[in-house]
Image: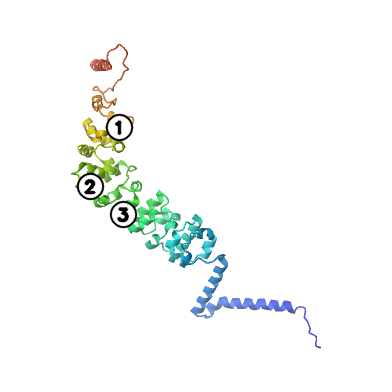
Amino acid sequence: MIQKRVFPNCTFTMKFMTVIVIGIFLTILNAQPSLGENESQRSLHKVLRRRVRSATACNSSFITGGRSNDFLLPVLYPASDLDACLNNSVLKANLTQLGNIAFSRTQLLVLKRKLAEIYPNGLPQEQIKRLGFIFTVYGPEEISTWNITDVDTLVLVLQNSPNINTRKAVIANYLQRSGTLNAVALDAIGGPTLCSLSEENLRTILPSELKKAKPLDISTCTQAKKDILFGIAKVAFQDQAGNPKAYYVLLKPYVGGASARDLQSLAAGNISMDFQTFSGLNPVEVEKLTPQNIRDLLGINLDSLKQNENHEIVQRWINTHTASEVKSLGIGLQGGISPAGLGNFFFEELPGSASVNNYSLLLSICIAVMSITMQWLL
């Protein structure tokens, strides 16, 4: 029987040689592109390595197009898994579905980064429309680099705008790229945000487009902007001027920019303006109205001035009209300018004394005489 001879260092030597051979093989493999490997082999080599890395990184199943509308994805795929298990090609093909899923902010940032990889030169307008919730993690500076020219894109993006600063950035982008403030845009923007636009932007609104738009709340606009919008509204609804009440209903959202002449014209139509609308008028223009203008303008709502006599607009009108004009309204308002320009005095009537009017008249005469005497002495 032949006995095998065992060399103590044989096992170690074999292992050592195996490591060397594998190392040489890997070195040659990595160097293949420079040694003349053809293009298809190099591509296969890259794909295999990418697949190995992806398979190692994704700890769950890859997200396919068929699962792109699964509302449980935010729970099943934390940000790191979402990053590893969602291929860019799937995101690109299913952006609308994935954009409508309520991912967390961290997860949305992952999607945003992936989109930057897919579109390194900026998001195309068609993809901006499909962002959905992903839009909420883009800042004003990033939005300013987009190219929003289509009003439908404007509408969709504004629906997902998280705050006023983002809305302003979107609208500014749209206007800077020759977007027009047509009826669709006005409806999407709305009154409060519209007030943040420049006066130059507002002047571009065509009366025909304002006429087609929904009524806009411009209460937060500056007086100058209210004036601009009222001027546009007058032209827009002038075909209803022959029907004063219908005309007023259409102008009502914009009447804060009406001049005294406009208000006088409206008053002639027996419109009975409510106090809330009256309080939003330009106080400078209201001061120009006569007591009869006020009476005609408010109609059945005239008593609301007494109920709101401490309101700024009421006090401003009182302080720019004589006491007799204020009294002529017949609703109990007090105040106004005295004939001598020295203000008015009111006294509590004492029992057994003359009337307050007699005392006021006597005091006014005394003050007038004193004033004349002082001027003569000087």
Task: Give the image location of residue 141, x and y in percent.
Answer: 42, 54
Which residue corresponds to mark 2?
A: 237
Residue at 54%, 68% in the rendered image: 54
Q: Nearer the viewer, mark 3 or mark 1?
A: 1
Q: CA distance from mark 2 to mark 1?
A: 28 Å
Q: Please, which residue is most extreme toward the right here?
A: 1
- Residue 283 location, x and y as percent? 29, 35
Task: Name the outermost residue toward the front.
Answer: 300
Callouts 3 and 2 close, C-beta under 8 Å: no
Q: CA distance from mark 3 to mark 1?
A: 37 Å
Query: At label 3, which amino acid type do we have?
Result: Val
To which residue does mark 1 refer? Answer: 304
Q: How is the image coloured?
A: rainbow
Answer with mark 3 or mark 2, whichever residue precedes in sequence: 3
Of pointers 3 and 1, the one earlier in the residue sequence: 3
The image position of residue 4, as x and y in percent, is: 78, 84
Furthest residue in direction left, as rendered: 242
Please name which of the two marks, 2 or 1, marks the residue nearer to the observer. Answer: 1
- Which of the labelled discs sits on residue 184, or is there none? 3
Are the residues flagged by discs 2 and 1 in contact, CB closer than 8 Å?
Answer: no
- View extreme (top): residue: 352
Residue drawn at 20 percent across, 41 percent down: 244
Depth check: give the residue in front, 10 or 27: 10
Quarter of the image for the C terminus: give it. top left
Left or right placement of residue 170 versus residue 361 in this view: right
Indicate the amino acid at tag 1.
Ser
